Image (cartoon, helix red, strand yellow):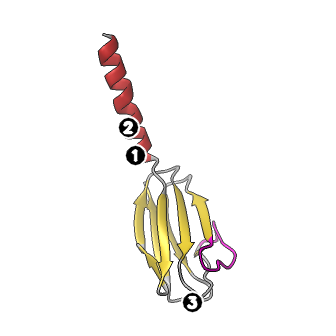
């Protein structure tokens, strides 16, 4: 019985950890990559600027907003509610992305 309980507990922890895995979005060549991600509620998404130019990450509904990110700077946000979050760079408005939270 202990073996089964241990295996069940281990399986639950593996499922939980994958559902809560952090997500990284790279900023390179004036693009968000990937530009569309789907994550679970409670996921931390981190944007990392790999460009020589500064960039920002701002949601259209203003739920999150970074300051200007220089090269290798990052910005993180934990998504606590389901929904679709469209975001852009205020310095380069053609840079667009979407985080879908389920």
Q: Secondary structure at mark 3?
A: loop
Depth check, front residue: 64 or 8: 8
Q: Are marks 1 and 2 in contact (CB under 8 Å)?
A: yes
The residue lying at 35 percent from left, 17 percent from top is 5
Residue ID for mark 1: 18
Residue 30, position as x, y percentages in the image:
49, 87
Residue ID for mark 2: 14
Depth check, front residue: 38 or 61: 38
Please identify the residue farthest to the right as the structure is shown: 67
**Residue 94, numbered circle:** none
Q: Secondary structure at mark 2?
A: helix
Q: CA distance from mark 3 to mark 1?
A: 33 Å
Residue 55, position as x, y percentages in the image:
60, 82
Q: CA distance from mark 1 to mark 2?
A: 6 Å
Depth check, front residue: 31 or 97: 31
The residue lying at 45 percent from left, 50 percent from top is 21
């Amino acid at each position: 019985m202990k073996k089964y309980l241990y295996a069940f507990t281990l399986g639950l922890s593996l499922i939980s950890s994958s559902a809560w895995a952090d997500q990284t979005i790279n900023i390179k060549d004036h693009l968000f990559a990937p530009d569309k991600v789907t994550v679970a509620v409670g996921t931390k998404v981190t944007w990392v600027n790999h460009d020589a130019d500064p960039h920002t990450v701002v949601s259209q509904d203003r739920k999150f907003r970074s300051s200007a990110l220089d090269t290798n700077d990052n910005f993180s946000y934990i998504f606590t509610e389901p929904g679709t979050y469209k975001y852009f760079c205020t310095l380069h408005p053609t840079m667009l992305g979407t985080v879908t939270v389920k």
